[in-house]
Amino acid sequence: MIARKRVAALALALYLALVGCIASYVYRWNEPQPRVQNRVVRVASPAPPSPQLDLPVFGAPTYKPAEAPSGMRLSVIHEPTFTAYVLWVRDPRRVEIVETRYPGVVGETVEQFVNDWHAVAGINGGSFTDTNWRGTGGLVQGIVISNGRVLQRASGSEPIVGFTAEGRLLSGTYTLAELQAMGVTQALMFGPTLVQGGVNQIQGAGDWGYAPRTAIGQTADGTVILMVTDGRELHGPADIGASLGDIARLMISLGAVTAANLDGGSSATLVYDGRLINQPTDILGERYIGTAVIVK
C-alpha cells in the first residue's frame, strides 16, 4: 500500500515538473521581445550668423572745412509728405562732378567724396549698377565728365545732367560729342529733366511714385540749388517722400529755371560743412555710390 502511494507521489511530482518545464518553455517562446529605441537628444540649433553690416554712418565726416563756407546757405522746407533740405550755392563754378576712386570695384559714400576732394558740401550723383543689391556702387553707368576729363564714355545719346565751363546747368539727352561741342566740363547720366526754361516738365506727380529724392537746379542769376528730401516713412507715416512733380513744383517756387532729378531713394544724401544733413534710408546708413556732385 505504502509502495503504491510513493509511486503515485513520484509520478505526480514528475508530471508537475514536466508541466512546469513545458509552461516555462512556452512562456519564453512567446515572451515579447524588448523594444529597442534610439534615444533622441534634442539640442538647440546654433543661431545663424548675423550679417556683418557696416555701422550706420550718421556722424560727422573726418574732413571739416577750416573756415565756415561762404557764398552758401542751407534752408529746410517742410512739405505735407516730406522735408526738403536745400543748399544754395551762389557761384556755379564751385560745383563739380566726381567719380569714385575705385571705378569698377567699389563706390564711396558722399562723406568720403567730400573728404577725398576737401569739399565743403556734396550730394549723391548719377546712375550706377548695384550688382545683386550689395551696395557696392562701383560700376558707374553712362557718360561721366569731371573737370573737363572724360572718365566714362557711351556710344549713343543719354539723359545727361551737367555744367558748361561758364557754370550753366543743362539737362537733356545728349551724345558725348554734343556735350564736348557745347563746352560741358561736368556731366553724369541721370534724369528726367524737371524744369526747362522755367516750365514744369512733369505731368502731375510723375511716374516714379513717392520716395526720398535728390535734385539739382539753377536760378536765373546762376545760383545752384542742391536739394535732398527724406521719405519712406523714416520719421513717421506722414513722411512718405516726394514725387517728381513735387520736386519740379518746389524748384520752380524757389526760382529755378533749370532743374533735373538725380539718383534718389536709398542714395539720397546731403553733406554740408562737416555734417550729414539728412538721414539716409539705407539700412547701412550712407550708400556707396558711383558719382557725386560736390562744392569746392
Image: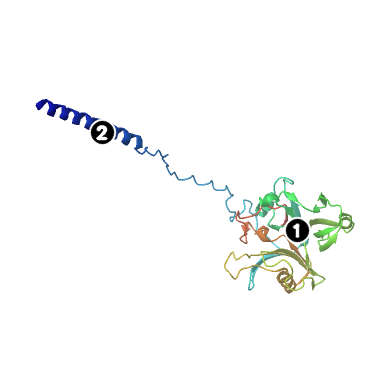
Residue at 89% across / 55% down in the picture? 177
* Residue 168 visible in rendering: no
The quadrant of the image that shows the C terminus is bottom right
Report x, y in % for residue 103: 74, 46
Residue projecting furthest to the top: 3
- Which quadrant holds the N terminus? top left
The foreground one among 209 and 150 is 209
Residue 19 badge:
2
Q: How crowded is mark 1: few (under 14 residues within 10 Å), some or many (20 or more)?
A: many
Is label 2 or label 1 in front? 2
Residue drawn at x 75%, y 51% as measured from the top left: 140
Identify residue type, mark 2: Val
Residue 214 in sight in this render: yes
The residue labelled by disc 1 is: 95
CA separation in Å, label 2 and label 1? 113 Å
SS label for mark 1: strand
Mark 1 residue type? Val
- Residue at 89% x, 57% y: name it: 178
Q: What residue occupies the far front of the structure in this picture?
A: 1
Counting from the top left corner in percent of width and height, residue 123 is at 69, 58
